[in-house]
């Protein structure tokens, strides 16, 4: 399939849907979403459309605390670098399968920088808990 530019909410929806299809069945992180957090996908996916639309296409729809659910998960399953590495790897694979161009690169760099400020096991400083993106 020919890779295209990310220009619309429909493109974002495709990216997010394909990414979480991979996440759900992934052998390293799938169970965290499905069994530990028991994610309600009908609720989560539209939030993720809003999130990525705001980051990539400058909409103003998101405005939530991104870190809160990750701290909650981290209490139950201490998140490890291996979890984050797999998340990023699935995300980058998905972006690169479908898209090309400046916004595709931006998606990858934004995901990496958010990963870098996320809680990991025994993080000494959890004062970053309230970061509204
Ligand atoms: C091991 C890595 C990760 C795990 C296990 C994880 C897990 C989760 C879970 C369980 C939720 C809550 C879903 C729900 O019930 O609605 C969530 C939400 C979210 N995650 Fe992650 N996540 C990871 C990494 C990341 C990264 C790297 C990003 C960077 C873009 C990210 C962005 C988000 C956003 C924006 C939300 C929605 C927060 C909200 O507004 O409620 N996650 N994640």
Image: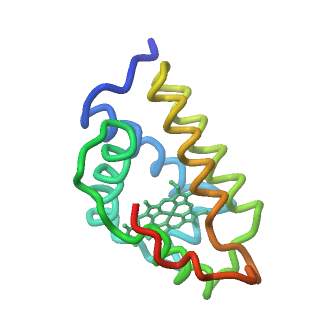
> Quick check: 126 left or right of 104?
right
Q: In the orientation shown, which residue stands out farthest toward the top?
A: 2
How are the colours assigned in the image? rainbow
Residue occupying the point 33% across, 68% down? 64
Where is residue 84? Give x, y as percent. Answer: 68, 58
Residue under the image location 53 percent in, 36 percent down: 94
Front-most of residues 84 and 27: 84
Quadrant of the snapshot with the N terminus: top left
Q: Looking at the image, which is closer to me, 72 or 86?
A: 72
Q: Is residue 91 above or below residue 83?
A: above
- Residue 116 image position (x, y, % from top left): 67, 58
Above or below 8: residue 58: below
Q: Quadrant of residue 57?
A: top left
The answer to whether 101 is drawn above or below residue 49 in the figure is: above
Q: Residue at x 47, y 77 (%)?
A: 130
Callout count: 0
| 57 w.r.t. 66: above or below | above
- Residue 13 lies in quadrant: top left
Q: In front: 129, or 21?
A: 129
Most distant residue in the bottom direction: 75
Residue 19 x %, y %: 48, 45
Image quadrant occupied by the C terminus: bottom left
Give the side of residue 96 with respect to residue 11, left or right. Answer: right
In percent of the image, x 49 and y 29: which residue is there?
104
């Amino acid at each position: 399939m020919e890779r295209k530019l990310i220009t619309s909410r429909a493109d974002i929806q495709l990216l997010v849907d394909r990414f979480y299809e991979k996440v759900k069945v992934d052998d390293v992180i799938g169970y965290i979403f499905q069994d530990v957090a028991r994610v309600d996908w009908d609720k989560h996916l539209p939030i993720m459309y809003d999130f990525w639309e705001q980051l990539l296409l400058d909409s103003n729809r998101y405005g939530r605390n991104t870190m809160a659910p990750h701290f909650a998960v981290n209490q139950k399953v201490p998140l490890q670098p291996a979890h984050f590495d797999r998340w990023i790897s699935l995300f980058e694979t998905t972006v690169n399968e479908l898209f090309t161009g400046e916004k595709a690169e931006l998606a990858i760099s934004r995901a990496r920088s958010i990963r870098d400020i996320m809680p990991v096991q025994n993080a000494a400083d959890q004062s970053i808990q309230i970061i509204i993106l």
